[in-house]
Image (cartoon, rainbow, N blue to C red):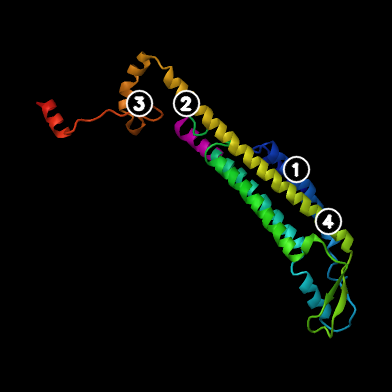
């Protein structure tokens, strides 16, 4: 396993994350990915081989194992971790797209031709929406997998003994799971870390939305204050520019548009004459 890949991904995503996002990344890579790679695979490596039933009927152990373990914990966790980490990579790709677009713009117009993005990595515009959607997707994926785990394994625990009466078993047989206590400990650990990750995603989502709302309200108040204290000279000097700005004339202004005469054609005709 190349740990440099995870280190590069972690450092790349960390640059564009909030404090809550950095905590989430540390929790995912240290307490979920590393625990999965180092320990969980070894604990579940012998689950089928050591699943014993008190019968010698051929095929009975296989069908009972498939009945009580339709999907392996390890494979479900692997799919969950892949789906959870992909949205963070999309944020990095979006920033890389912005930087490449900014570079092409500078090459086309030069250094004095202005910039498309003042800070390509700052969460504004489309990048803000990409980041918010990634938070929603990550929380939804973890929630969905917690539900799937609970559906397959009620209360996220494994019993020590399971009773099976599926053909070709001759009767109801007892089957014994290998190391159930150890597997229950790791299962609960992964469930708790997933729940904490969901909580961090929701906190970060609320933080970003509330911050954007506060910035929008502050900008509106600043515009209203600026319009209220604008001197008359500035208003008259900008009047010609306002008339050329089309539908932006009355944007953010409390003044009503000028009323046209009842018969515009007659007014134009009189003016021409």
The CA span between labels 1 and 4 is 19 Å
Q: Secondary structure at mark 4?
A: helix
Upstream in sequence: badge 1 or badge 3: 1
Q: Secondary structure at mark 2?
A: loop
Q: Is there a contact, CB below 8 Å, between mark 1 and mark 3?
A: no
Q: Is there a contact, CB below 8 Å, between mark 2 and mark 3?
A: no
Q: Work out whether 108 lies above or below 24.
A: above
Marks 2 and 3: which is nearer the front?
3
Q: Which residues are magenta?
A: 99-112
Upstream in sequence: badge 3 or badge 4: 4
Residue 186: which numbered mark, if any?
A: 4
Upstream in sequence: badge 4 or badge 2: 2
Residue 16 screen position, x and y as percent: 64, 38
Marks 3 and 4: which is nearer the front?
3
Upstream in sequence: badge 1 or badge 2: 1
Q: How many marks?
A: 4
Upstream in sequence: badge 2 or badge 3: 2
Residue 112: which numbered mark, if any?
A: 2
Quadrant in the rendering for residue 41:
bottom right
On whether residue 111 falls in the magenta region, the answer is yes
Q: Quadrant of the C terminus?
A: top left
Q: Report the side of 115 relative to 246 (left or right).
A: right
Residue 26: which numbered mark, if any?
A: 1
Q: Work out whether 166 lies above or below 42.
A: below
The CA span between labels 3 and 4 is 66 Å
Viewer-proximal residue, 12 or 164?
164
At 74% from the left and 61% from the top, the residue drawn is: 150
Marks 1 and 2: which is nearer the front?
1
């Amino acid at each position: 396993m190349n740990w440099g890949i995870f280190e590069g991904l972690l450092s790349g995503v960390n640059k564009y994350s909030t404090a809550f996002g950095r905590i989430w990344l540390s929790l995912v890579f240290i307490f979920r990915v590393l625990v999965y790679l180092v320990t969980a695979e070894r604990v579940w490596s012998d689950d089928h081989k050591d699943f014993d039933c008190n019968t010698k009927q051929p095929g009975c152990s296989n069908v009972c194992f498939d009945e009580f373990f339709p999907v392996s914990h390890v494979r479900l966790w692997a799919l969950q971790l892949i789906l959870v980490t992909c949205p963070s990579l999309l944020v990095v790709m979006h920033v890389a797209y912005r930087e490449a677009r900014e570079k092409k713009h500078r090459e086309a117009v030069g250094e004095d031709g202005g910039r498309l993005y003042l800070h390509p990595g700052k969460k504004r515009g489309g990048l803000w929406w990409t980041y918010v959607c990634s938070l929603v997707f990550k929380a939804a994926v973890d929630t969905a997998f917690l539900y799937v785990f609970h559906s397959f394994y009620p209360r996220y625990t494994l019993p020590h003994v399971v009773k099976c009466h599926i053909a070709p078993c001759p009767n109801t047989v007892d089957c014994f799971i290998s190391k159930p206590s150890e597997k229950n400990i790791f299962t609960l650990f992964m469930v708790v870390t997933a729940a904490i990750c969901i909580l961090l995603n929701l906190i970060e989502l609320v933080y970003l939305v509330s911050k954007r709302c506060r910035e929008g309200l502050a900008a509106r108040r600043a515009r209203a204050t600026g319009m209220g204290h604008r001197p008359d000279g500035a208003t008259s000097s900008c009047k010609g520019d306002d008339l050329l700005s089309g539908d932006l004339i009355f944007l953010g202004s409390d003044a009503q548009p000028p009323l046209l005469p009842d018969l515009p054609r007659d007014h134009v005709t009189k003016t021409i004459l």
